[in-house]
């Protein structure tokens, strides 16, 4: 029997890595002991100019009966990514015998050995993340930990009021290499009733957006501000005026006022293509210091339903258009097709609150419908997931630093890494892998949950 030893520096990110490794070793009944004759899993933070940003190097070496797994990266988060891939990709592949008897499907790679390797892996998309309302994060620590397991590094959290525990959320996220962007509305509510011809009203709404930033967000820890304005509609005009013609100078004015005081602040404009797609020349005039984050751009992966792939070619063409829209100015997108709020009973929050600290009872009450929705969406992701791949390259060609997010809200991601979310993350890490292979590898991850409703055993 072989013994294995884990050696990792002590950081919050690598505490998660250790937890993953220890769980993996327990699964294979591997004794863990710090002995000279033990095989070793070593994680080390080592500056290496040859490694791409967030990349890691994994080496598996054999010396006689002993093996060592060495995972190195320039940061502890990069090492965490390597550990996650070892546990969730390398080990599941190594355990397969590709036979149905003698041995029976599986082997124990920790006992029988891994193939030697020396490889470098790094993300194809630099900014990979999720978008959610804050109040439907039920457990922020577990939500963020599951993001880190999937090598996601950015989250936009939308709120009616800045969270009371914002500093704690940001500290936890930063420990895991995750940027936090706070989101709030500029000049609209859940419906658009702004009179665009009323210049006095527009000026007052602009003042309110700036004042709210200064009051709630200016001193808040975080990595940027995401905002939406009055573009979430299928109408091109409101109150007799073009939405694009009004929103561009209005948003630019607010951004200029905020950036005058906070010139290094990242601002992200959440823009719905449905109301401005016919006036891209006007949208191109958005302040180049502001990242435009597009959504509702056509078929899946922009559509709320992953079954909606009609007009996929037009969607890809439109992605190519807006990704090349501005010579200077960053781009992002929010993809959909997983799960969203139940808007039939939505009510705004009554006031500031702590987020991500719900009870076990609240989680249990939500889980049946979340699982049911994810069971539906996972079936269409298995069928249509390649459509996400089709937009990644156009986005990267337009902006190599583009941001790609997925709407994952009220889906209890903190309790379960659902297949669609894992497929999304895997695609952003490497969209060049053929989708059937990506689906196979992701489905074999031991941390991925297929959302099948629990049923009583039948005899």
Image: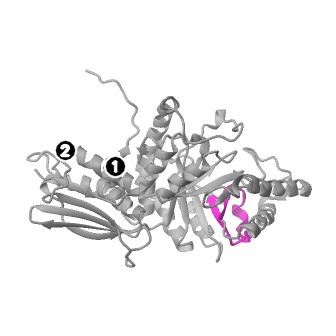
At a point 41% along the width and 73% down the height, the residue shown is 52
Q: Are marks 1 and 2 in contact (CB under 8 Å)?
A: no
Q: Is residue 150 visible?
A: no
Label 1 residue SS: helix
Range drawn in magenta: 266-294
Q: How many marks?
A: 2
Q: Say which residue appears at 16% left-offset and 62% top-offset.
A: 67
User: In the rendering, at what x and y percent does residue 276 appear?
Assistant: 72, 60
Residue 357 versus residue 6 in the image, above or below: above
* Residue 198 highlighted magenta (yes or no): no
In the displayed structure, would residue 389 be above or below residue 401?
above
Q: Nearer the viewer, residue 237 or 161?
A: 161
- Residue ID for mark 2: 29
Element assignment for label 2:
loop
User: Magenta includes 285?
Assistant: yes
Q: Which residue is mark 1?
A: 19
Vertical arrangement, residue 285 with respect to residue 5, above or below:
below
Locate residue 366, reporting x and y percent. Answer: 52, 32
Q: Answer with mark 1 or mark 2, whichever residue precedes in sequence.
A: 1
Residue 46 is left or right of residue 287, and the answer is left
């Amino acid at each position: 029997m072989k013994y294995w030893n884990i050696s990792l520096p002590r950081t919050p990110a690598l505490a998660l890595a250790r937890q993953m490794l220890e769980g993996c070793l327990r699964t294979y009944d591997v004794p863990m002991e710090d002995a000279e004759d033990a095989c070793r899993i070593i994680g080390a933070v080592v500056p290496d100019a040859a490694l791409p940003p967030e990349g890691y190097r994994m080496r598996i070496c054999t010396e006689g009966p002993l093996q060592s797994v060495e995972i190195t990266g320039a940061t502890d988060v990069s090492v965490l990514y390597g550990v996650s891939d070892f546990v969730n990709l390398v080990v599941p592949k190594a355990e397969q015998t590709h036979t149905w008897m003698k041995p029976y499907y599986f082997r124990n790679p920790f006992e029988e050995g891994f193939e030697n390797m020396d490889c470098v892996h790094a993300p194809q998309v630099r900014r990979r993340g999720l978008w959610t309302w804050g109040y439907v994060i039920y457990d922020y620590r577990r939500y963020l930990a599951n993001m880190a397991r999937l090598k996601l590094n950015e989250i936009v959290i939308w709120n009616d009021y800045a969270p009371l525990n914002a500093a704690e959320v940001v500290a936890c996220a930063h420990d895991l290499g995750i940027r936090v962007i706070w989101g709030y509305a500029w000049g609209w509510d859940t419906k658009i009733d702004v009179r665009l011809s009323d210049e006095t009203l527009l000026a007052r709404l602009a003042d309110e957006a700036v004042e709210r930033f200064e009051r709630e967000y200016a001193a808040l820890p975080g990595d940027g501000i995401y905002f939406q304005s009055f573009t979430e509609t299928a109408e091109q005009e409101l109150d007799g005026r073009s939405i694009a013609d009004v929103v561009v100078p209005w948003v630019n004015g607010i951004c200029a006022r905020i950036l005058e005081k906070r010139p290094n602040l990242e601002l992200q404009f959440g823009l719905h293509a449905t109301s401005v797609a016919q006036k891209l020349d006007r949208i191109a005039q958005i302040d180049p210091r502001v990242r435009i984050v597009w959504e509702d751009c056509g078929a899946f992966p922009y559509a709320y339903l992953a079954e909606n792939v009609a007009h996929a070619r037009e969607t890809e063409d439109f992605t190519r258009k807006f990704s090349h829209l501005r010579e200077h100015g960053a781009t992002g997108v929010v993809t959909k097709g997983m799960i969203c709020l139940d808007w039939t009973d939505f009510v705004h929050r009554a006031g500031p609150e702590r987020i991500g600290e719900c009870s076990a009872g609240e989680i249990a009450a939500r889980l049946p419908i979340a699982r049911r929705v994810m069971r539906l969406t996972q079936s269409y992701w298995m069928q249509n997931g390649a459509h996400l791949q089709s937009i990644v390259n156009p986005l990267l060609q337009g902006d190599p630093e583009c941001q790609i997010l997925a709407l994952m809200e009220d889906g209890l991601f903190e309790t379960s890494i659902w297949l669609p979310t894992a497929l999304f993350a895997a695609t952003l890490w490497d969209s060049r892998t053929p989708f059937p292979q990506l689906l196979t590898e992701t489905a074999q991850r031991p941390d991925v949950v297929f959302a099948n409703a629990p049923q009583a055993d039948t005899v």
